[in-house]
Amino acid sequence: MSQWFENRTAVLATMHGKERAIAPPLRSSLKLEVIVPENFNTDVFGTFTREIKRPDTQLETARRKALKAMEITGNSIGIASEGSFYPYPGLPLLSCDREIVLLIDKVNDLEIIGETISTDTNHHHQSITSVAQALEFARKVGFPRQGLVVMLTKDATEREDIFKGITGEENLIEVVKSFLDKSPHKSIHIETDLRAMLNPSRMKAIEAATLDLIQKINRPCPMCHRPGFEVKERIKGLPCKLCHAPTELVRAEVYSCSGCDYREEKAFPRGDTSADPMYCNYCNP
Ligand SMILES: [Zn+2]
Ligand SMILES: [Zn+2]
């Protein structure tokens, strides 16, 4: 599918060094060059450190970032990525990171979304009452390759109560001391910086989402040959092995083309034609 993108240039809406994860695979697989606009401030779309709330969903935020970068630079292809951290479904103590990488191509009227869910998140936080505790936390999370954020309280929203992007020990000690001094309870909050350039785990997840995007681009519609023939719907009801009643597990995936509306149903996407009775409401109520 590289002829769709060959020798074109995409603008990547980032100020957090995401091009290191996104640009190389796009160049080698699609011959698509990626540029980053100068002084593009993505913080207006929301920040992880909560002083600016993300007003839209993850997908809508990525879309708005990509369109904004396209508008500023006049590029016909825009790319944006957006991460979201939340408890892993069913395992509330495990944090996971859903990363999406979105590509919009105005010339061909395409919007394709690559995604990945990673549980290797390095998403940690703690309240601390001493410099020693801060250093202990730093050691555990892989500082200084992993950056840190120190906050007066975990709900702080004022800029002067949040110190981001700490990557040096001296700086860490100095910030922790001054925040402890300021704190009425002599207790402050420390957490891993989730911005991509300071979070190696996120960078890896962003790269995986980019590879997923490329895989989707490389799957053309069998009717009109547009890139991005992908799964848009999952149908539940995989039959129970014992009683054949439909379960909540996926029975089929529906691929569809947003260009010509052609659809194809693929049964048993995981390879199994029946479900373990443990998922059955009758056999295992
Ligand atoms: Zn089609
Ligand atoms: Zn059953």
Image (cartoon, rainbow, N blue to C red):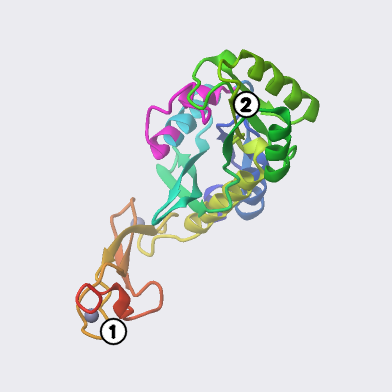
Q: Residue at x 53, y 23 (%)?
A: 153
| Mark 1 element type | loop
Q: Secondary structure at mark 2?
A: strand
Left or right, residue 136 beside residue 63? right
Q: Is residue 198 left or right of residue 240?
A: right
**Mark in front: 2 vs 1:** 2
- Choose between 126 and 239: the one closer to the eye: 126
Q: Position of residue 174 (x, y in %)?
A: 75, 20
Name which residue lies at 58% across and 36% down.
126
Amino acid type, mark 1: Lys
Q: Residue at x 64, y 51 (%)?
A: 25
Q: Amino acid at mark 2?
A: Val
- In the image, residue 152 sits, relative to residue 244, either above or below, namely above
Read off the magenta span. 40-61
Residue furthest right in the image: 170
The yes-or-no answer for disc 1 within 8 Å of ligand 2 is yes
> Which one is nearer the viewer's eye here, 153 or 83?
153
Residue plotted at (38% across, 72% down): 269
Answer with the quarter of the image where residue 64 lies. Answer: top left
Residue 45, image x, y percentages: 46, 26
